[in-house]
Amino acid sequence: MELVELVGTIVARYHDEYEQAAFRHALTGAQARVLALLSVKPMPMRRIAQKLKCEPSNITGIIDRLESRGLVERRPDPDDRRVKLAAPTEEGNRTAARLRDGLDFAREPLSELSREERLVLRGLLRRIVGEPAAG
Amino acid sequence: MELVELVGTIVARYHDEYEQAAFRHALTGAQARVLALLSVKPMPMRRIAQKLKCEPSNITGIIDRLESRGLVERRPDPDDRRVKLAAPTEEGNRTAARLRDGLDFAREPLSELSREERLVLRGLLRRIVGEPAAG
DNA sequence: TATTGTTATACTCTATAACTATA
DNA sequence: TATAGTTATAGAGTATAACAATA
């Protein structure tokens, strides 16, 4: 099995598992990604679009749906009245935490590897990602 | 940077690059995946749905759009008149080949690694994917 | 004038359910 | 009866263009 094909397999599996984890919380993949993003740090609508690499107009609907479920709220930005800060509610933060815990990919397949092997893998992946040697 | 985060980064990058490669040929991601699949081997509509992990009814529209662009055609199955085999046209095969060649991910980041490192990486990824030692 | 978020619109992908034609 | 593909429908994500409020 070729390296590129292996990477493709892992990408597909990771993606599927993320979608499934989202589905368990009655979220779509996009909604789960936005919620996960906001649970790290609230941010303006436009910043979310940049992170998701999509047009800002799409974020309106995604936040609408998360807001209607009580997982996210829109707050005014005291420094710029044009800006709306999207932030998770308490329930949103709890959902985001359970979402993280439900990502089996982290545990199961990687647990096949020993500690040393994981360090080797991490080093190789860092090279691929283009990380500097730090960390 | 943690291992899981690294995998997530690579997954996102791979995904983006695939979408971009598809876009360069005026294809959506789903259309490109189906075309790539069929360029390996023509198959019944239902089999495509299984490969893409979606409902068969969706495949009708995707094949419709590929067919209207002359990239794919529907052929009867001589063994079962219910079945329609989706197969790439000559132009479809050419497009699929150019699509494969345009996937920079294969070349650029992996080329950072030496031959030995790539073998080590392949071995580790095989373990993660759960491949038997064969190949 | 430029920017932020929104609205309106259209297209694609998706699941569900009902349908046709075969088996 | 069961299966393969289709159609109809609805919801979600996406891009584009135009808009109101604010900078």
Image: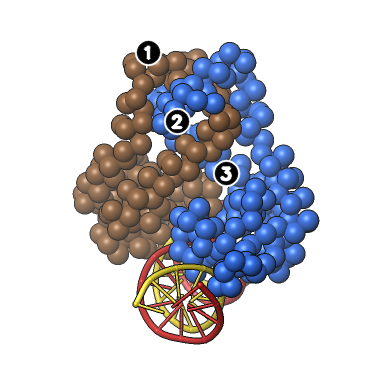
Chain colours: A blue, B brown, C yellow, D red
The amino acid sitting under disc 2 is Glu
Q: Position of residue C22 (x, y in %)?
A: 46, 58
Q: What label does residue A56 carry, if any?
A: none
| Residue receiving disc 2 | A131
Above or below, C19 against B85 in this view is below
| Cα distance in 3D space between marks 2 and 1 | 20 Å
Q: What label does residue A16 carry, if any?
A: 3
- Give the residue displayed 26% in from the left and 39% down from the top: B101
Q: Chain of mark 3?
A: A
Which quadrant would residue D17 be assigned to in this image? Answer: bottom left
Q: Position of residue A40 (x, y in %)?
A: 65, 48
Q: Are marks 1 and 3 on the same chain?
A: no
Which quadrant would residue A8 be assigned to in this image? Answer: top left
**Mark 2: secondary structure:** loop
Q: Chain of mark 2?
A: A
| Residue receiving disc 1 | B116
Q: Are marks 3 and 2 on the same chain?
A: yes
Closer mark to the observer between disc 2 and disc 1: 2
The amino acid sitting under disc 3 is Asp
Is the residue marked by circle 3 packed among few (<14), some (14-19), or many (20+) residues within 10 Å?
A: some
Res A63 visible: no
Q: Position of residue B53 (x, y in %)?
A: 53, 48
Marks 3/2 in contact by CB < 8 Å: the verdict is: no
Relative depth, front residue between A7 and B76: A7
Look at the image and tell me in which quarter the C terminus of chain A lies.
top right
- Give the residue displayed 49% in from the left and 65% down from the top: A56
Which quadrant would residue C18 be assigned to in this image? Answer: bottom right
Closer mark to the observer between disc 3 and disc 2: 2
